[in-house]
Amino acid sequence: MYKRVLLKLSGEALSADGEIFNAAVLDDISAQIKTVVDDGVEVAIVVGGGNFIRGRMADDLGIDRMQVDYMGMLGTVINALAVQGALERHGVHTRVQTAIDMTKVAEPYIPRRAIRHLEKGRVVVFGAGTGSAFFSTDTTAALRASEIKADVILMAKNGVDGIYDSDPRTNPNAKRLESLTYMEVLQKELAVMDATATSMCMDNDIDLLVFNMNEKNNIIKAVRGEAVATRVSKGGN
């Protein structure tokens, strides 16, 4: 079992049935995280904002990419507050820290403060991405995991149970990979996370577990080391 983990949730992971937020999904995620925290694992979370907006929508909207990225960062803060509310309803002490100061609703991101919260058994949810445009929340996850010295990044995917050698949605013969290296991810251009995030994880020797969050209790199983994920590491062992 890992001691300190960073869970990467997409914005879409919080939604279902056309809703921006789905109460049942939030409740299930929170219940799993509570179990993990009760097991003594320190948990940080990076949440995306794709249920609101994505950078690639800039051209369709006719809005500058930088502005769209900042809109997305604000969306991640809304998501972080939703996750905090759901966790606290389950009795899990939670703090939200944001890369853009908004002290009325959250703490500013301070790495040492975040680490101290984790050491006290609090879940820390990071919002507002890196605070800069042109960086994805995948990169945010890699950066925050490096800064708080997390053992692993848990990348929760919707409906995909790991990494495949090609897109399983378009290729019925796609092969699921049990483990691989970050260099293989880069060389094969596998759509796991963006190249910046991949390189950062490799440079800082942080493992990545990619799993299907739609399967029952897979967050718990991934933390406990059960074989529900594809593992990416610097050495591939």
Image (cartoon, grey):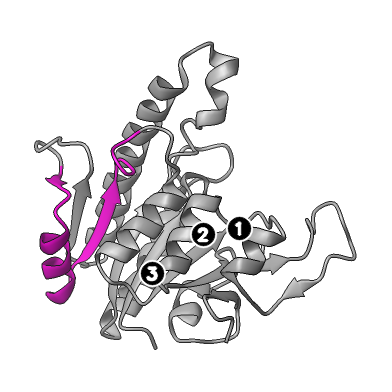
Characterize the local packing of mark 2: few (<14), some (14-19) or many (20 or more) Cα atoms within 10 angstroms.
Answer: many
Q: Are marks 1 and 2 in contact (CB under 8 Å)?
A: yes
Q: What residue appears at the point 35 percent right and 43 percent down from the top-left corner?
A: 79
Bounds of the magenta segment: 106-132
Identified by mark 2, the residue type is Thr
**Element carrying mark 1:** loop
Magenta stretch encompasses residue 109? yes
Is 151 or 87 nearer to us in this picture? 151
Is 50 or 151 nearer to us in this picture? 151
- Position of 133 compared to 174: left or right? left
Residue topped by disc 1: 192
Disc 3 versus disc 1: nearer the observer: 3
Where, by quadrant of the figure, is residue 67 drawn?
top left
Report x, y in % for residue 201.
44, 65
What's the CA distance linking mark 2 and mark 3? 10 Å
Identified by mark 1, the residue type is Val
Residue topped by disc 3: 204
Where, by quadrant of the figure, is residue 60 drawn?
top right
**Element carrying mark 3:** loop
| Residue 28 visible in the shown view | no
Q: State the mark number for residue 223.
A: none
Q: What residue appears at the point 53 percent right and 74 percent down from the top-left corner?
A: 218
Mark before the other along the chain sequence, 2 or 3: 2
Residue topped by disc 2: 198
Q: Are marks 2 and 3 in contact (CB under 8 Å)?
A: no
Quarter in which the N terminus is drawn: bottom left
Disc 1 versus disc 2: nearer the observer: 2
Mark before the other along the chain sequence, 3 or 1: 1
Identified by mark 3, the residue type is Asn
What's the CA distance linking mark 1 and mark 2? 8 Å
